[in-house]
Amino acid sequence: MNAWGPPAVEECSPFYGKYIDELNAADLFAALDQVTAASNTLVARIPPGMDGHRYAPDKWSIAEVLQHLVDCERIFQYRALRFARNDRTELPGFDENSYAQEAAANVRSIADVYDELLLVRHSTVALFRSFPDGTALRSGPANGRTITVRALGWTIAGHHLHHRRILEQRYL
């Protein structure tokens, strides 16, 4: 068994399962590499001056979408760390819209926010590579649902893919 292969459906809620199902990779590290490489290409295609661009008045800007990815990845990393260390304390959910409002991403450039995302991604890869294979199936409760360490890693990649597709389809 590949400890870091795609998670079984029962390892996370259907909400996150829909993100994971969109990935096509043999293991978590390949999935993270794939979404990162595709996003590098996408961000390079964003024309100058689009930092605050929204495809509709009530939607996040490009910079806010990227900041959302940063925030979520950090939260999912933290959950994975806690559960990998056998801490089964219930972890709360979070309101992504409140986070977006407080992040002030629109005062930063897309390049700056994306650089931060890449740093967080390097941290994610280092964190998951540091976990012994036996921790992949450890789980804990977050936001009222049980999720495994492995599924959290795949959620990071799948969530990133989901939002990259939105950027491609609706923003560019």
Image: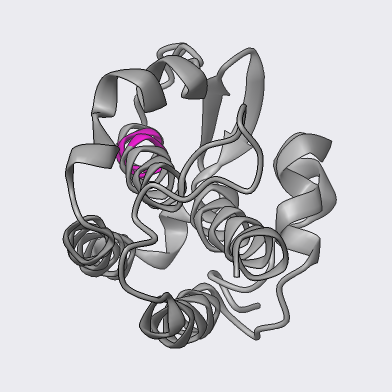
Residue 3 x %, y %: 55, 70
In the figure, residue 20 lies in which quadrant?
A: bottom right
- The image position of residue 65, as x and y in percent, is 46, 47
User: Is residue 147 left or right of 48 when viewed as pictured?
Assistant: right
12 sits left or right of 75 in the view: right
Q: Is residue 85 magenta?
A: no
Q: Position of residue 9 (x, y in %)?
A: 83, 50
**Residue at the spot x=37%, y=20% of the render?**
101
Quadrant of residue 51 in the image?
bottom left
Q: How many marks?
A: 0
The C terminus, quarter of image: bottom right
Q: In this rendered view, identify the residue nearer to me: 70 or 146.
A: 70
Q: Is residue 105 above or below residue 127?
A: above
Q: Is residue 86 left or right of residue 59?
A: left
* Of 29 and 10, the residue lying toward us: 29
Q: Is residue 148 above or below residue 150?
A: above
Residue 80 painted magenta: yes
> Looking at the image, which residue sits at the far front?
49
Q: Quadrant of residue 141?
A: top right
| Residue for point 50% across, 54% down | 156
Question: What is the magenta segment's predominant secondary structure?
Answer: helix
Give the quarter of the figure containing the N terminus: bottom right
In front of the other: 124 or 130: 124
Q: Which residues are magenta?
A: 75-81
Residue 146, position as x, y percentages in the image: 64, 27
Residue lying at 54% horizontally and 70% vertically, measured from the top left: 4
Q: Residue at x 63, y 48 (%)?
A: 55
